[in-house]
Image: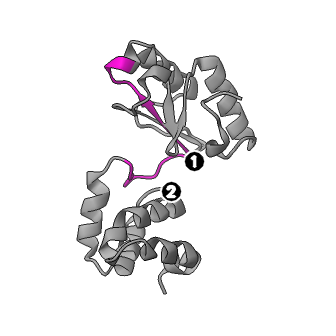
Amino acid sequence: MNPLLTKYAERIAKTLAKYPDKRSAVMPLLYIAQEEYGYVSPEGIDQVAEICDMDPTQVKSVAGFYTMYSEKPKGKYWLQVCTDLACALRGADKFHEELKDYLGVEEGGTTEDGMFTVEHVMCLAACDKAPMLQCNFHFVENLDMEKMKQLIAEWRAGVNAEVQKLSNGSK
């Protein structure tokens, strides 16, 4: 039996119901696989392919094309700092470097405890709220290192663990 289909049967059924063709549900199903495995694993690709009646190579090509899917394991908190020109003018480059230094990681690296992966990305469309980042696909805006250190401490302690509960990066 397909582990994704077993664990997320209701969620997958609701997703499939939104599309006239199963193949059209490949992207939201990849999110479910990524959520389950922490990245779009080979097993996740095979399971999504089975659900969508697709060849795994087709599913892998979708996962490889879009930057919102990771084909490598990430930390529990995937921190994507926008560093395009508009954000850089508001201090994003410096913030990105300070964040990597604080966590002791290189670009794209994950902390030893597996909690945080830091990457730079281009244009998250929140230029007026930079420095900002996307954490597990939720925006955290108007950041400085003091706010970020507080969030990191809370996340490490399991406090405020639900990123989506954050409101514009502030409490």
Q: Quadrant of residue 108?
A: top left
For the image, the number of numbered tags is 2
- Side (left or right) of 11 relative to 25: right
Give the farthest residue toward the bottom: 1
- Residue type at the position of mark 2: Gly
Residue highlighted by disc 2? 38
What colour scheme governs how the chains and residues are painted in the rendered image of this protein? Answer: one colour
What residue is rendered at 61% in x and 29% in y?
Answer: 169
First in residue order: circle 1 vs circle 2:
2
Instruction: Kindly state the secondary structure of the residue where label 2 is placed.
Output: loop
Is residue 11 in view?
Answer: yes
Tell me the quarter of the image containing the C terminus.
Answer: top right
Residue 45, numbered circle: none
Is residue 130 in view?
Answer: no
Residue 6: image x %, image y %? 55, 81
- Residue type at the position of mark 1: Lys
Few, some or many residues within 10 Å of mark 1 (<14, 14–19, 20+) = some
Confirm whether the magenta stretch covers residue 82: yes
Question: Residues in magenta?
Answer: 68-86
Q: Are circles 1 and 2 on residues that touch, CB within 8 Å?
A: yes
Q: Is residue 161 above or below residue 50?
A: above
Residue 76, numbered circle: 1
What residue is rendered at 69% in x and 26% in y?
Answer: 150
Residue 138: image x %, image y %? 53, 42
Q: Quadrant of residue 89?
A: top left
Few, some or many residues within 10 Å of mark 2 (<14, 14–19, 20+) = some
- Side (left or right) of 158 relative to 135: right
Instruction: Kindly state the secondary structure of the residue where label 1 is placed.
Output: loop
Residue 65: image x %, image y %? 26, 53
What residue is rendered at 59% in x and 19% in y?
Answer: 145
